[in-house]
Image (cartoon, rainbow, N blue to C red):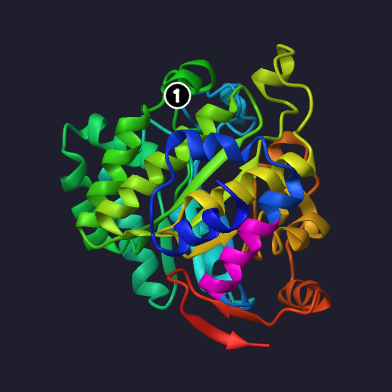
């Protein structure tokens, strides 16, 4: 297809075939960037949004031991589980900085049952009723269901009743079972991830969809991932946004075994981001990833299909565990970066409702 055909097909809400999506990888980067940017302009306008958030990792104990992860505890003495008091202290501190969203994730810790989470969520909501609790990835939900002998639906219903507002899209990595058997063989497969998300959407809970690439996947695996989330969005309309970011290899098993030595290039990131915008016709919001790409490339991503700058991330531990330098992004830094490229900017909440324009 030519350039205009891709734009028109997206705006009409028509699916690209697998072959049409694969063909995008053969196009020059400026071409896919131009297609994605035009779609973004017509679908979202020029406004760039961001959320004030904090990532709290309640435990680093995880039986999955994924080969791309540097966060889980390797030794018994490195293990931790945050106390309720510590989690509440972190949320209280975050609210003082204007945070509206708490992303709460950890690992598949066999010592923590559903009642631990129910009590925690109720405590959070009783003390911080305005905080949007964006909590537990699909693999964590799936693990809880297996551990407790409950259905995914029952686990989600209990957590929603306790105070969970929405589901982060983590744990998707690349939704290709070929890839997952290599990098995360102990984690839920593609169908299980989709099942959790479908069930959450049926229960009225929104979620994001994510992809972490730049390890052992091929172009066709990326397309498989995009088509899977696109097709579920057609069924449920439950995804608020799509976020892709690049694998940071240092201190991971993939790095130590020499399978992946370096992160993929900024050009590859922008290519995949743009293709995601073009393929995902039923997603309004596409996030840039300053956490893995830094501000310069994240700002450039606003011209490759992204309309959202992600979060301020008052705290982040998973990517930082790889040795990637991290510091939180101040609201004024995001505002300045976006305005520097001539775009209006606004703070949003988890559901992409505007809180404040700058």
- Whether 324 is among the magenta residues is no
Task: Please report the residue visible at 45 percent of the width from the left and 18 percent of the height from the top.
Answer: 185
Q: Mark 1 points at which residue?
A: 63
Q: In this view, does 244 lie above or below 120?
A: above
In the rendered structure, which segment of residues is drawn in magenta?
Answer: 34-44
Residue 350 visible in the current orientation: yes
Q: In this view, does 349 lie above or below 6?
A: below
- Decide which of 198, 320 is in the foreground and name it: 198
Task: Please report the residue visible at 27 percent of the width from the left and 44 percent of the height from the top.
Answer: 114
**Is 233 left or right of 147, judged from the image as shown?**
right
Task: Please report the residue visible at 67 percent of the width from the left and 42 percent of the height from the top.
Answer: 319
Position in image of residue 50 (x %, y %):
61, 71
Q: Is residue 18 above or below residue 75?
A: below
Position in image of residue 211 (x %, y %):
53, 41
Position in image of residue 43 (x %, y %):
51, 71
- Decide which of 79, 129 is in the foreground and name it: 129
Where residue 13 sits, quadrant-wise, is: bottom left
Where residue 140 sits, quadrant-wise, is: top left
What is the chief secondary structure element of the magenta stretch? helix
Residue 80 visible in the current orientation: no
Residue lying at the far top in this picture: please name it: 257
What secondary structure is found at the residue carrying circle 1? loop
Mark 1 neighbour class, 10 Å CA radius: few under 14, some 14 to 19, many 20 or more: some
């Amino acid at each position: 297809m030519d350039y205009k055909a891709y734009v028109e097909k997206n705006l009409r809400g028509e699916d690209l075939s697998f072959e049409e999506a694969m063909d995008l990888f053969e196009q020059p980067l400026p071409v896919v960037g131009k297609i994605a940017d035009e779609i973004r302009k017509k679908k979202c306008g020029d406004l760039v949004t961001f959320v004030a958030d904090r990532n709290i990792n309640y435990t680093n104990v995880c039986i999955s031991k994924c080969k791309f992860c540097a966060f889980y505890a390797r030794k018994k003495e490195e293990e931790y589980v945050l106390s309720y008091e510590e989690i509440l202290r972190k949320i209280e501190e975050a609210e003082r900085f204007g945070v509206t969203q708490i992303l709460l994730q950890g690992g598949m810790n066999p010592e923590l049952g559903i009642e631990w989470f129910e009590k925690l969520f109720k405590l959070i909501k009783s003390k911080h009723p305005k905080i949007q609790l964006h909590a537990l990835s699909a693999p964590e939900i799936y693990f809880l269901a297996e551990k407790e002998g409950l259905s995914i639906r029952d686990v989600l219903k209990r957590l929603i009743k306790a105070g969970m507002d929405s589901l982060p899209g983590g744990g998707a990595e690349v939704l290709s079972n070929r890839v997952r058997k290599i990098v995360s063989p102990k984690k839920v497969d593609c169908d299980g991830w989709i099942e959790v998300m479908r069930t959450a959407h049926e229960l009225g809970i929104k979620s994001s969809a994510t992809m972490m690439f730049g390890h052992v996947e091929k172009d066709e695996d990326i397309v498989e991932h995009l088509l899977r989330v696109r097709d579920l969005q057609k069924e449920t309309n439950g995804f608020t946004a799509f976020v892709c970011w690049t694998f940071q290899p240092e201190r991971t098993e993939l790095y130590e075994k020499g399978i992946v030595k370096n992160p993929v290039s900024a050009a590859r990131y922008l290519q995949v981001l743009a293709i995601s915008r073009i393929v995902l016709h039923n997603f309004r919001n596409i996030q840039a990833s300053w956490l893995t790409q830094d501000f310069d490339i994240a700002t450039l991503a606003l011209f490759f299909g992204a309309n959202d700058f992600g979060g301020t991330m008052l705290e982040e531990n998973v990517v930082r565990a790889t040795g990637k330098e991290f510091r939180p992004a101040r609201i004024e830094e995001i505002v300045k970066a976006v305005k520097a490229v001539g775009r209006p900017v606004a703070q949003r909440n988890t559901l992409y409702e505007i809180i404040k324009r700058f």
